[in-house]
Image (cartoon, rainbow, N blue to C red):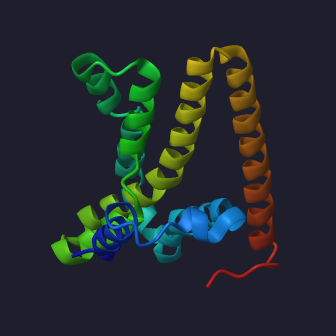
Amino acid sequence: MPGIVLLSACGLLAGPVLGLQRPSEALGEAYQPLIKLAVAAILFEGGLSLRFAELEQSAAVVRRLTTVAVALSLTAWVAHGIVGMDWPMALVLGAITVVTGPTVILPLLRQARLKRRPASFLKWEGIVNDPKGAVLVVVMFEYSVGASAGHMDETLTHLAAGVGAALLLGGAGGWALGRAFLAGLCRST
């Protein structure tokens, strides 16, 4: 059984079910920064096991898996059309279901003992979709909050500015890191 399943069950049991732990009360002001740090560690932990030679062989399949999945999946349509959720909340739910996550996929792949190629597709899909899905969830949540508060113009402006700044900083950082590797200033292990 993947460790994330046991940890989730223990956390739910100790927290909401039995009330033994209330991290938000125990940690006070440090709670939110620690949550953000934990999410960042989970998002990028999967990148430590990457082998780019695998991606060269499976790039087309991984690209299709990640772009089709990021189209908010069918969950948003089902949540709105069948369940009757309003669109902003249905989009948040759809964005959440995009995230497959390496913390879930990698342990399952180890137990499933798939052939190397399908396992590579699924591993890369989980690792690539995780950060995309996390950003998508935040964007959809901000959209949902803005829509319910009636501040759509302001919300969309802030979202566009945030996404633009992230793309610019991420692109510039990636380019600079790539140049450093090419110049021999950094070594990959």
Write down the quadrant of residue 75 in the picture: top left
Q: Nearer the viewer, residue 59 or 177?
A: 177
Q: Report how many numbered discs are placed on residues in the image.
A: 0
Write down the quadrant of residue 180 in the picture: bottom right
Residue located farthest toward the front when viewing the structure as drawn:
19
Above or below: residue 85 compared with residue 47: above
Q: Nearer the viewer, residue 11 or 131?
A: 11
Q: Residue at x 80, y 51 (%)?
A: 172
Percent x, y of residue 66: 41, 45
Q: Residue at x 26, y 17 (%)?
A: 81
Q: Nearer the viewer, residue 46 or 172?
A: 46
Percent x, y of residue 185: 82, 78
Q: Nearer the viewer, residue 116 or 83?
A: 83
Above or below: residue 81 compared with residue 56: above
**Quadrant housing the C terminus:** bottom right
Could you tell whether 151 is left or right of 114 in the image? right
**Quadrant housing the N terminus:** bottom left
Could you tell whether 12 is left or right of 161 in the image? left
> Can the viewer see residue 113?
no
Q: Residue at x 57, y 44 (%)?
A: 135
Percent x, y of residue 60: 39, 48
Percent x, y of residue 87: 42, 19
Write down the quadrant of residue 73 in the picture: top left
> Can the viewer see residue 173?
yes
Above or below: residue 72 compared with residue 122: above
